[in-house]
Image (cartoon, rainbow, N blue to C red):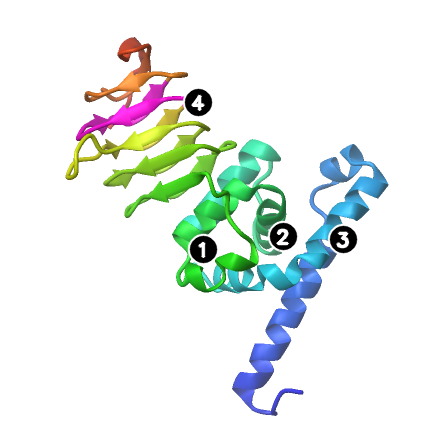
Amino acid sequence: MAKRTGASILTVRYPTRLISALLIFRGPRRERRADAPMKAAAKQVLLLLNLIRLWPTLLIIAFSGSDAPIRADIRRWCAILFHEEPAGFALLHRHMHLMVFFREYRNLVYLRLPFARAYRWMMPPLDSLHLDIPDLGPGCFIQHGFSTMVAVERIGANFWLNQQVSIGYSNDDDCPTIGNDVTVRPGAKIVGKLRIGDGATIGLNTVVTGNVPAGATVFGVPGRVIWRNRVDT
């Protein structure tokens, strides 16, 4: 039992109400109609069984500000995967769902949150996805992400990363800088001290060794601009 002090009562009661709300929430009506009752029940049981492994990240996100990058990440994942914009307890419930069913999402969470080494063993990340990103903008989405290495100076907001991608150094002191709203498709290779402009798309299996202008779609080996959209700055 907790001691009857203001701090200890707050510490016990708040997570209790938070946990109750997370387990009761089942998402929007559209998803409940799509899932068979047994499938929906099985997912809720899995979330319940994993709750003990989720509490460190849940508490950190629950007490983070509304503009925290990890919250923007969750909203973008939900917009792409579930076509919804969760908030409040719904956002935390979706975080639980993503942690349990999308291992590549765990890599992003551990990159974002403090003291990740202390609790990442509880829910191991995808071991073939390596992210060395000292400055990552909000709204990052990783699709599959296996066999992928990313080492950059900076990545802007709303980055989309696919699987079997290599982004990194050409020698021991250079690496790329990536702007906002950039998409990198499966198998792409981006190497050296270069800049990928805002709104660019790097196509399937493309090799990039030079700067890419804003709004460009690059494809081929070596990569060439095949289309360019106007990007307002």
Report the disc number at residue 160: none
Residue identifier under label 4? 186
**Residue under label 3:** 45
| Dot in front, 4 or 2 | 4
- Residue named by callout 2: 93
Question: Disc 2 versus disc 3: distance between alpha carbons?
Answer: 13 Å
Question: Which residue is at 72% across, 51% downward?
Answer: 46
The residue to which callout 1 is attached is: 66
Which is closer to the viewer, label 2 or label 3? 3
How many neighbours does mark 1 have within 10 angstroms: few (below 14), some (14-19), or many (20 or more)? Answer: few
Cα separation between marks 4 and 3: 34 Å
N-terminal label among 2 and 3: 3
Residue closest to the far top: 226
What is the x, y in percent for residue 124?
Answer: 53, 51
Q: Earlier in the sequence, mark 4 or mark 3?
A: 3
Q: Amino acid at mark 2?
A: His
In the rendered structure, which amino acid carries the disc numbered 3? Val
Three-letter residue code for mark 4 = Pro
In contact (CB < 8 Å): disc 4 and disc 3: no
Rounded to the nearest whole Å, what is the CA distance between mark 1 and mark 3? 29 Å
| Side of 30 where 112 appears, left or right | left
User: Element under label 1?
Assistant: loop
